[in-house]
Amino acid sequence: MIGRRRWTLAAAALAAAIPAAGTPAPVAEAAGAEGFSVRITSPVAGDFVLGTGRIAAEVTAADPELVAKVEFYVDDRLVFIDKEPPYEMVHGFGDEPRSFVLRVEAYRHDGRTVSDTRVTRRLLIHYQTSVDRVILNANALDDENHPVLDLTRDDFVLMEDGVPQEIIDFYLEERPITMAIVLDSSGSMKHAIAGAQQAADGFVDTLRPGDRAMVIDFDEKVFLLQPITDDKAELKRAIDSTYPQGGTSIYDALFSALRLLNTEEGRKAIVLLTDGDDYDSHFSFERILDGTRSSEVVLYGIGLGSDIRKGPLKDLADETGGRAFFPGGVEKLPEVYDQVNRELRSQYFLSYSTTNQDFDGKFRKITLKSLRPKVEIRTRNGYFGVARGEEPPAAG
Protein backbone atom coordinates (compact mmCIF):
# COMPACT_ATOMS: atom_id res chain seq x y z
CA MET A 1 0.00 0.00 0.00
CA ILE A 2 1.27 3.45 -0.88
CA GLY A 3 0.92 6.32 1.55
CA ARG A 4 -1.16 4.58 4.21
CA ARG A 5 -0.63 2.04 6.98
CA ARG A 6 -3.21 -0.54 7.99
CA TRP A 7 -4.31 -1.90 11.37
CA THR A 8 -4.42 -5.69 11.17
CA LEU A 9 -7.53 -7.14 12.81
CA ALA A 10 -6.15 -10.59 13.52
CA ALA A 11 -8.96 -13.11 13.88
CA ALA A 12 -7.27 -14.87 16.75
CA ALA A 13 -6.81 -11.64 18.67
CA LEU A 14 -10.36 -10.51 18.10
CA ALA A 15 -11.60 -13.87 19.34
CA ALA A 16 -9.66 -13.31 22.58
CA ALA A 17 -7.90 -16.61 22.16
CA ILE A 18 -6.08 -17.94 25.21
CA PRO A 19 -2.37 -18.60 24.58
CA ALA A 20 -1.44 -22.27 24.56
CA ALA A 21 -0.49 -23.69 27.95
CA GLY A 22 3.22 -24.01 28.47
CA THR A 23 4.08 -21.33 25.95
CA PRO A 24 6.72 -19.11 27.56
CA ALA A 25 5.82 -15.46 27.72
CA PRO A 26 8.32 -13.02 26.19
CA VAL A 27 10.70 -11.42 28.64
CA ALA A 28 9.42 -7.90 29.19
CA GLU A 29 10.77 -4.91 31.02
CA ALA A 30 8.85 -2.05 32.65
CA ALA A 31 11.26 0.41 31.08
CA GLY A 32 13.83 -0.52 28.50
CA ALA A 33 16.99 0.96 27.17
CA GLU A 34 16.98 4.08 25.06
CA GLY A 35 13.89 5.40 26.85
CA PHE A 36 11.62 2.61 25.56
CA SER A 37 8.63 2.21 27.91
CA VAL A 38 4.88 1.67 27.98
CA ARG A 39 2.18 2.57 30.48
CA ILE A 40 -1.56 2.05 30.71
CA THR A 41 -3.29 5.43 30.68
CA SER A 42 -6.90 4.20 30.81
CA PRO A 43 -8.45 2.97 33.02
CA VAL A 44 -6.62 4.83 35.75
CA ALA A 45 -5.22 3.07 38.81
CA GLY A 46 -7.89 2.05 41.33
CA ASP A 47 -10.75 2.55 38.89
CA PHE A 48 -13.50 -0.01 38.29
CA VAL A 49 -14.75 -1.18 34.88
CA LEU A 50 -18.21 -2.40 33.94
CA GLY A 51 -19.89 -2.91 30.59
CA THR A 52 -17.99 -1.47 27.62
CA GLY A 53 -14.76 0.35 28.47
CA ARG A 54 -11.69 1.81 26.83
CA ILE A 55 -8.15 0.49 27.37
CA ALA A 56 -5.39 2.84 26.26
CA ALA A 57 -1.60 2.71 26.43
CA GLU A 58 1.14 5.26 25.87
CA VAL A 59 4.46 4.18 24.38
CA THR A 60 7.62 6.21 24.84
CA ALA A 61 10.42 5.55 22.35
CA ALA A 62 13.37 7.53 21.06
CA ASP A 63 12.19 6.72 17.55
CA PRO A 64 8.45 5.89 17.27
CA GLU A 65 9.13 4.05 14.00
CA LEU A 66 10.93 1.37 16.02
CA VAL A 67 7.68 0.37 17.73
CA ALA A 68 6.26 -2.72 16.01
CA LYS A 69 3.04 -3.33 17.93
CA VAL A 70 1.24 -3.20 21.27
CA GLU A 71 -0.62 -6.24 22.57
CA PHE A 72 -3.53 -5.89 25.00
CA TYR A 73 -4.34 -8.62 27.53
CA VAL A 74 -7.32 -8.97 29.86
CA ASP A 75 -6.86 -11.61 32.56
CA ASP A 76 -3.91 -13.03 30.57
CA ARG A 77 -6.00 -13.36 27.41
CA LEU A 78 -4.81 -11.63 24.26
CA VAL A 79 -7.73 -9.51 23.10
CA PHE A 80 -6.27 -6.99 20.65
CA ILE A 81 -3.14 -6.04 18.69
CA ASP A 82 -2.57 -2.43 17.66
CA LYS A 83 0.22 -1.56 15.22
CA GLU A 84 -0.11 2.20 15.09
CA PRO A 85 -0.77 4.98 17.63
CA PRO A 86 -2.98 5.87 19.35
CA TYR A 87 -2.67 2.47 21.04
CA GLU A 88 -6.17 1.80 22.34
CA MET A 89 -9.12 -0.52 22.11
CA VAL A 90 -12.69 -0.93 23.34
CA HIS A 91 -13.44 -4.02 25.42
CA GLY A 92 -16.66 -5.53 26.73
CA PHE A 93 -16.04 -6.26 30.42
CA GLY A 94 -19.54 -7.66 30.95
CA ASP A 95 -22.00 -6.84 33.71
CA GLU A 96 -20.29 -8.75 36.53
CA PRO A 97 -18.75 -6.16 38.91
CA ARG A 98 -15.38 -7.87 39.44
CA SER A 99 -11.73 -6.92 39.19
CA PHE A 100 -9.67 -7.45 36.05
CA VAL A 101 -5.95 -7.77 35.42
CA LEU A 102 -5.01 -5.60 32.43
CA ARG A 103 -1.62 -5.90 30.74
CA VAL A 104 -0.07 -4.27 27.71
CA GLU A 105 3.13 -5.35 26.00
CA ALA A 106 4.95 -3.09 23.54
CA TYR A 107 7.31 -4.64 20.99
CA ARG A 108 10.13 -3.05 19.04
CA HIS A 109 11.18 -4.37 15.64
CA ASP A 110 14.45 -5.58 17.16
CA GLY A 111 12.56 -7.89 19.54
CA ARG A 112 12.82 -5.83 22.74
CA THR A 113 9.61 -5.70 24.78
CA VAL A 114 8.30 -3.65 27.69
CA SER A 115 5.07 -4.08 29.62
CA ASP A 116 2.74 -2.49 32.13
CA THR A 117 0.03 -4.05 34.30
CA ARG A 118 -3.00 -2.60 36.02
CA VAL A 119 -5.54 -4.27 38.32
CA THR A 120 -9.01 -2.72 38.39
CA ARG A 121 -11.01 -2.81 41.56
CA ARG A 122 -14.24 -4.64 42.22
CA LEU A 123 -17.49 -2.68 42.39
CA LEU A 124 -20.11 -3.92 44.83
CA ILE A 125 -23.65 -3.61 43.51
CA HIS A 126 -26.65 -4.53 45.65
CA TYR A 127 -29.38 -4.61 43.06
CA GLN A 128 -30.32 -6.55 39.95
CA THR A 129 -32.14 -5.38 36.85
CA SER A 130 -33.61 -7.14 33.85
CA VAL A 131 -34.00 -5.76 30.34
CA ASP A 132 -36.74 -7.21 28.14
CA ARG A 133 -37.21 -4.42 25.60
CA VAL A 134 -36.66 -5.55 22.01
CA ILE A 135 -35.76 -2.89 19.44
CA LEU A 136 -36.44 -3.25 15.73
CA ASN A 137 -35.57 -1.18 12.69
CA ALA A 138 -37.84 -1.94 9.77
CA ASN A 139 -38.18 -0.94 6.13
CA ALA A 140 -41.52 -0.85 4.34
CA LEU A 141 -41.35 -1.18 0.55
CA ASP A 142 -44.02 -1.23 -2.14
CA ASP A 143 -44.03 -3.66 -5.06
CA GLU A 144 -41.58 -1.41 -6.94
CA ASN A 145 -39.11 -1.28 -4.00
CA HIS A 146 -40.02 2.31 -3.15
CA PRO A 147 -40.12 3.24 0.56
CA VAL A 148 -43.55 3.52 2.16
CA LEU A 149 -43.31 6.24 4.79
CA ASP A 150 -46.93 6.92 5.83
CA LEU A 151 -47.63 3.79 7.89
CA THR A 152 -48.89 4.02 11.45
CA ARG A 153 -48.47 1.73 14.44
CA ASP A 154 -51.87 0.19 13.67
CA ASP A 155 -50.67 -0.84 10.19
CA PHE A 156 -48.26 -3.40 11.70
CA VAL A 157 -48.77 -6.86 13.15
CA LEU A 158 -45.90 -8.07 15.34
CA MET A 159 -45.40 -11.66 16.50
CA GLU A 160 -42.68 -13.41 18.52
CA ASP A 161 -42.66 -17.19 18.07
CA GLY A 162 -46.25 -16.86 16.86
CA VAL A 163 -47.41 -14.89 19.90
CA PRO A 164 -48.79 -11.37 19.30
CA GLN A 165 -46.73 -8.54 20.82
CA GLU A 166 -47.74 -4.97 21.60
CA ILE A 167 -45.70 -2.29 19.85
CA ILE A 168 -44.66 0.31 22.44
CA ASP A 169 -42.49 2.82 20.59
CA PHE A 170 -43.10 3.67 16.95
CA TYR A 171 -41.70 6.45 14.77
CA LEU A 172 -39.72 7.16 11.61
CA GLU A 173 -35.99 6.85 12.31
CA GLU A 174 -33.96 10.04 12.50
CA ARG A 175 -31.10 8.87 14.72
CA PRO A 176 -27.57 9.02 13.27
CA ILE A 177 -26.03 5.84 11.88
CA THR A 178 -22.69 4.23 12.67
CA MET A 179 -21.51 2.18 9.71
CA ALA A 180 -18.79 -0.24 8.72
CA ILE A 181 -17.86 0.12 5.04
CA VAL A 182 -16.29 -3.26 4.26
CA LEU A 183 -14.40 -3.68 0.96
CA ASP A 184 -12.99 -6.73 -0.77
CA SER A 185 -9.41 -6.06 -1.90
CA SER A 186 -8.54 -9.61 -2.95
CA GLY A 187 -6.63 -10.23 -6.15
CA SER A 188 -9.79 -10.89 -8.13
CA MET A 189 -10.84 -7.25 -7.65
CA LYS A 190 -7.98 -6.08 -9.89
CA HIS A 191 -10.20 -4.84 -12.71
CA ALA A 192 -12.99 -3.53 -10.48
CA ILE A 193 -11.11 -1.79 -7.68
CA ALA A 194 -11.09 1.71 -9.21
CA GLY A 195 -14.83 1.67 -9.86
CA ALA A 196 -15.49 0.20 -6.43
CA GLN A 197 -13.48 2.95 -4.76
CA GLN A 198 -15.28 5.66 -6.67
CA ALA A 199 -18.70 4.25 -5.78
CA ALA A 200 -17.79 3.84 -2.10
CA ASP A 201 -16.48 7.42 -2.03
CA GLY A 202 -19.85 8.55 -3.35
CA PHE A 203 -21.57 6.61 -0.58
CA VAL A 204 -19.44 8.43 2.00
CA ASP A 205 -20.79 11.71 0.61
CA THR A 206 -24.31 10.64 1.70
CA LEU A 207 -23.34 10.63 5.39
CA ARG A 208 -25.36 13.17 7.37
CA PRO A 209 -24.35 15.25 10.38
CA GLY A 210 -23.99 12.87 13.33
CA ASP A 211 -23.32 9.82 11.12
CA ARG A 212 -20.01 8.03 11.54
CA ALA A 213 -18.26 5.23 9.70
CA MET A 214 -15.20 3.02 9.68
CA VAL A 215 -13.44 1.42 6.70
CA ILE A 216 -12.40 -2.25 6.75
CA ASP A 217 -10.81 -4.02 3.82
CA PHE A 218 -9.88 -7.65 3.44
CA ASP A 219 -7.98 -10.12 1.34
CA GLU A 220 -6.87 -13.27 3.18
CA LYS A 221 -6.38 -10.94 6.16
CA VAL A 222 -8.57 -8.21 7.60
CA PHE A 223 -7.42 -4.59 7.99
CA LEU A 224 -8.96 -1.64 9.78
CA LEU A 225 -8.04 1.18 7.41
CA GLN A 226 -9.93 3.90 9.25
CA PRO A 227 -11.41 3.70 12.76
CA ILE A 228 -14.83 5.22 13.38
CA THR A 229 -14.94 8.87 12.39
CA ASP A 230 -17.23 11.51 10.92
CA ASP A 231 -14.41 12.88 8.75
CA LYS A 232 -15.45 12.18 5.16
CA ALA A 233 -12.02 13.06 3.79
CA GLU A 234 -10.34 10.49 6.04
CA LEU A 235 -12.90 7.84 5.08
CA LYS A 236 -12.32 8.48 1.38
CA ARG A 237 -8.57 8.46 1.86
CA ALA A 238 -8.86 5.02 3.45
CA ILE A 239 -11.11 3.71 0.68
CA ASP A 240 -8.81 5.00 -2.04
CA SER A 241 -5.81 3.34 -0.39
CA THR A 242 -7.11 -0.18 -1.05
CA TYR A 243 -5.32 -2.29 -3.64
CA PRO A 244 -6.04 -5.81 -4.94
CA GLN A 245 -3.96 -8.76 -3.76
CA GLY A 246 -4.32 -12.08 -1.98
CA GLY A 247 -7.26 -14.30 -1.10
CA THR A 248 -10.70 -13.75 0.37
CA SER A 249 -11.82 -13.83 4.03
CA ILE A 250 -15.35 -12.42 4.01
CA TYR A 251 -16.48 -14.00 7.27
CA ASP A 252 -13.43 -12.80 9.20
CA ALA A 253 -14.12 -9.27 7.95
CA LEU A 254 -17.76 -9.49 9.01
CA PHE A 255 -16.73 -10.82 12.41
CA SER A 256 -14.43 -7.85 12.87
CA ALA A 257 -17.10 -5.38 11.78
CA LEU A 258 -19.72 -6.90 14.09
CA ARG A 259 -17.32 -6.91 17.03
CA LEU A 260 -16.42 -3.26 16.56
CA LEU A 261 -20.01 -2.12 15.97
CA ASN A 262 -21.37 -4.05 18.94
CA THR A 263 -19.57 -1.59 21.23
CA GLU A 264 -21.50 1.31 19.67
CA GLU A 265 -24.92 2.64 20.63
CA GLY A 266 -27.76 3.57 18.29
CA ARG A 267 -28.36 2.56 14.70
CA LYS A 268 -25.67 0.41 13.12
CA ALA A 269 -25.10 -0.98 9.64
CA ILE A 270 -22.54 -2.95 7.65
CA VAL A 271 -22.22 -2.30 3.91
CA LEU A 272 -20.15 -5.12 2.40
CA LEU A 273 -18.77 -5.28 -1.13
CA THR A 274 -17.22 -8.50 -2.44
CA ASP A 275 -16.74 -10.31 -5.73
CA GLY A 276 -16.05 -13.88 -4.67
CA ASP A 277 -16.46 -16.82 -2.34
CA ASP A 278 -14.76 -17.15 1.05
CA TYR A 279 -11.70 -19.40 1.03
CA ASP A 280 -9.51 -18.06 3.83
CA SER A 281 -11.65 -17.19 6.88
CA HIS A 282 -11.07 -18.64 10.33
CA PHE A 283 -14.73 -18.12 11.14
CA SER A 284 -17.56 -20.13 9.61
CA PHE A 285 -20.76 -18.93 7.99
CA GLU A 286 -22.70 -20.38 10.93
CA ARG A 287 -20.63 -18.37 13.42
CA ILE A 288 -21.30 -15.14 11.55
CA LEU A 289 -25.00 -15.98 11.22
CA ASP A 290 -25.24 -16.34 14.99
CA GLY A 291 -23.25 -13.13 15.34
CA THR A 292 -25.87 -11.23 13.33
CA ARG A 293 -28.63 -12.75 15.43
CA SER A 294 -27.05 -11.50 18.65
CA SER A 295 -26.53 -7.94 17.40
CA GLU A 296 -28.70 -5.08 16.22
CA VAL A 297 -26.66 -4.46 13.07
CA VAL A 298 -28.32 -4.42 9.66
CA LEU A 299 -26.22 -5.86 6.82
CA TYR A 300 -26.30 -4.81 3.19
CA GLY A 301 -24.30 -7.13 0.95
CA ILE A 302 -23.17 -6.28 -2.58
CA GLY A 303 -21.94 -9.17 -4.71
CA LEU A 304 -20.07 -8.39 -7.93
CA GLY A 305 -19.42 -10.65 -10.91
CA SER A 306 -20.44 -14.16 -11.88
CA ASP A 307 -18.33 -16.04 -9.31
CA ILE A 308 -20.22 -14.76 -6.30
CA ARG A 309 -22.12 -17.27 -4.16
CA LYS A 310 -25.44 -15.52 -3.70
CA GLY A 311 -26.91 -17.79 -1.04
CA PRO A 312 -24.70 -16.96 1.98
CA LEU A 313 -24.71 -13.22 1.29
CA LYS A 314 -28.47 -13.16 0.90
CA ASP A 315 -29.06 -15.27 4.01
CA LEU A 316 -26.92 -12.98 6.18
CA ALA A 317 -28.58 -9.83 4.84
CA ASP A 318 -32.09 -11.24 5.24
CA GLU A 319 -31.33 -12.30 8.80
CA THR A 320 -30.62 -8.68 9.79
CA GLY A 321 -33.42 -7.02 7.83
CA GLY A 322 -31.02 -5.77 5.17
CA ARG A 323 -30.71 -6.71 1.51
CA ALA A 324 -28.29 -8.37 -0.85
CA PHE A 325 -27.61 -6.83 -4.26
CA PHE A 326 -26.04 -8.55 -7.25
CA PRO A 327 -25.53 -5.81 -9.84
CA GLY A 328 -23.22 -7.78 -12.10
CA GLY A 329 -20.83 -5.05 -13.20
CA VAL A 330 -18.97 -2.37 -11.30
CA GLU A 331 -20.63 0.35 -13.38
CA LYS A 332 -23.89 -0.27 -11.48
CA LEU A 333 -22.38 0.20 -8.02
CA PRO A 334 -23.34 3.89 -7.64
CA GLU A 335 -26.98 2.93 -8.17
CA VAL A 336 -26.72 0.15 -5.56
CA TYR A 337 -25.07 2.37 -2.96
CA ASP A 338 -27.79 4.96 -3.60
CA GLN A 339 -30.44 2.31 -2.92
CA VAL A 340 -28.70 1.34 0.33
CA ASN A 341 -28.65 4.99 1.39
CA ARG A 342 -32.36 5.44 0.61
CA GLU A 343 -33.28 2.41 2.69
CA LEU A 344 -31.16 3.49 5.64
CA ARG A 345 -32.90 6.90 5.53
CA SER A 346 -36.43 5.43 5.47
CA GLN A 347 -36.52 3.07 8.44
CA TYR A 348 -39.16 2.77 11.13
CA PHE A 349 -38.17 2.40 14.79
CA LEU A 350 -40.28 -0.05 16.80
CA SER A 351 -39.89 -1.52 20.26
CA TYR A 352 -41.82 -4.02 22.33
CA SER A 353 -41.59 -5.72 25.71
CA THR A 354 -41.59 -9.45 25.10
CA THR A 355 -44.30 -11.49 26.80
CA ASN A 356 -41.87 -14.42 27.06
CA GLN A 357 -39.97 -13.90 30.32
CA ASP A 358 -38.29 -17.31 30.19
CA PHE A 359 -34.77 -16.24 29.16
CA ASP A 360 -33.57 -19.71 28.17
CA GLY A 361 -31.04 -18.64 25.51
CA LYS A 362 -33.08 -20.03 22.62
CA PHE A 363 -33.57 -18.17 19.36
CA ARG A 364 -36.88 -16.33 19.12
CA LYS A 365 -38.46 -15.78 15.73
CA ILE A 366 -39.81 -12.29 14.98
CA THR A 367 -42.50 -11.76 12.34
CA LEU A 368 -43.47 -8.22 11.37
CA LYS A 369 -46.11 -7.67 8.70
CA SER A 370 -48.12 -4.81 7.28
CA LEU A 371 -51.90 -4.86 7.05
CA ARG A 372 -51.66 -2.64 3.98
CA PRO A 373 -51.73 -4.69 0.77
CA LYS A 374 -48.61 -4.95 -1.42
CA VAL A 375 -46.30 -3.60 1.28
CA GLU A 376 -43.28 -5.73 2.21
CA ILE A 377 -41.75 -5.30 5.66
CA ARG A 378 -38.10 -6.15 6.30
CA THR A 379 -36.62 -6.37 9.77
CA ARG A 380 -34.31 -8.75 11.63
CA ASN A 381 -35.59 -12.31 11.87
CA GLY A 382 -35.20 -12.70 15.62
CA TYR A 383 -32.89 -12.69 18.62
CA PHE A 384 -31.52 -14.94 21.35
CA GLY A 385 -33.60 -14.85 24.52
CA VAL A 386 -30.87 -14.34 27.10
CA ALA A 387 -30.98 -12.53 30.41
CA ARG A 388 -28.84 -9.45 30.85
CA GLY A 389 -25.19 -10.29 31.44
CA GLU A 390 -25.34 -13.64 29.62
CA GLU A 391 -23.93 -14.46 26.22
CA PRO A 392 -25.89 -16.09 23.35
CA PRO A 393 -24.67 -19.48 22.16
CA ALA A 394 -21.80 -19.46 19.67
CA ALA A 395 -21.44 -21.74 16.67
CA GLY A 396 -18.57 -22.84 14.52
Image: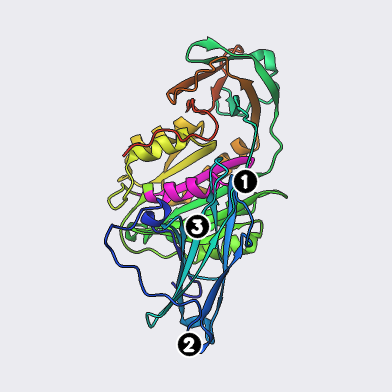
Of marks 2 and 1, the one in the foreground: 1
Q: CA distance from mark 3 to mark 1?
A: 14 Å
Numbered tag placed on residue 33 in the rendering: 2
Q: Which residue is mark 3?
A: 101
Of marks 2 and 3, the one in the foreground: 3
User: Residue 152: which quarter of the image?
Assistant: top right
Q: Is residue 334 visible?
A: no
Q: How many marks do you count on the picture?
A: 3
Element under disc 2: helix
- Left or right: where 234 falls relative to 331: right
Q: CA distance from mark 2 to mark 3?
A: 26 Å
Q: Is residue 216 magenta?
A: no
Name the quarter where the N terminus is drawn: bottom left
Q: CA distance from mark 2 to mark 1?
A: 38 Å
Q: Residue at the far bottom: name it.
A: 34
Numbered tag placed on residue 123 in the rendering: 1
Residue at the spot 53% in from the left edge and 74% down from the top edge: 38
Which residue type does callout 3 highlight?
A: Val
User: Residue 227: which quarter of the image?
Assistant: bottom right
Element under disc 3: strand
Asked whether disc 2 touches disc 3, contact meaning CB atoms under 8 Å apart, the reply is no
User: Residue 354: which quarter of the image?
Assistant: top right
Which residue type does callout 2 highlight?
A: Ala
Foreground pick, 335 / 234: 234
Residue at the spot 59% in from the left edge and 24% down from the top edge: 132
Q: Which residues are magenta?
A: 252-275
The tag earlier along the polypeptide, 2 or 1, is 2
